[in-house]
Amino acid sequence: MAIQKTKTILLGIIVVLSLLVFIQACEKSSTIGSAHTVILTENETKTSAFEGKNVAITATKFTDSRCPINADCVWQGNATVKVNFKDENKEQEITMCIGGCDVLSVNLPKTIVLNGKTYQIKLEEITPYPTLNKPIAEPSKAKIIISR
């Protein structure tokens, strides 16, 4: 009888410890709210709220040297955009790049501080993509994702 009771207690302890391990493994997400996606054309300013405080975001300069579609190129090229972030405390201008950016001597940031909080930033795409023998008729747009 004592052996059966000891087995039951040990089994209960194992179950409780297993549940604690699973609960500990469920990591709380550090993302507050969802990611902000901002699409900007040159010299366009959009205002987004980050944890209740407004931030003005402006794309100030696009450059695009990516290899056009259906072209034979020596390297893939890259596209850059300068983006200005203005919060309640300060104004920051950064260069964001997509494509063959590793050849640039510019230190490209992966984070930005907005209203005292650090955010991850990513240049998702710059459109339209260059094409061979066809002028681009629409203005360039940068899709930027900002998340915690």
Image (cartoon, rainbow, N blue to C red):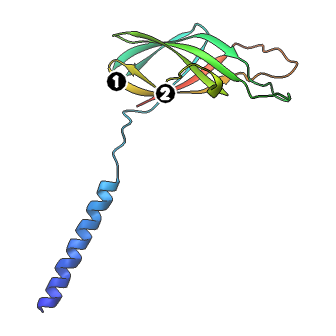
Q: Earlier in the sequence, mark 1 or mark 2?
A: 2
Does the image show residue 99? no
Q: Is residue 50 left or right of residue 65?
A: left
Secondary-structure class at tag 1 = strand
Secondary-structure class at tag 2 = loop
Q: Residue at x 73, y 14 (%)?
A: 138
**In front here: 73 or 32?**
73
**In front here: 101 or 86?**
101
Does the image show residue 32? yes
**Where does label 2 land, which residue?**
110
Q: Residue at x 41, y 14 (%)?
A: 55
Look at the picture and state if 84 lies above or below 35. Answer: above
Q: Residue at x 76, y 28 (%)?
A: 75
Q: Is residue 4 left or right of residue 91?
A: left
Q: Residue furthest bottom?
A: 1
**Residue 99: x and y, percent?**
67, 28
Q: Name the kind of residue labelled 1 in the image.
A: Lys
Res. 34 image quadrant: top left
Q: Name the kind of residue labelled 2 in the image.
A: Lys
- Mark toward the viewer: 1 or 2: 2
**Residue 78: x and y, percent?**
69, 23
In what quadrant of the picture does the C terminus appear? top left
**Where does label 1 land, which residue?**
117
**Residue 127: x and y, percent?**
68, 22
Q: Residue furthest top?
A: 43
**Residue 100: x and y, percent?**
67, 28
- Whole-number angstrom distance, CA of label 1 to CA of label 2: 14 Å
Res. 112 image quadrant: top left
**How many residues crowd mark 2 within 10 Å: few (<14), some (14–19), many (20+)?**
few
Q: Is residue 130 left or right of residue 105?
A: right
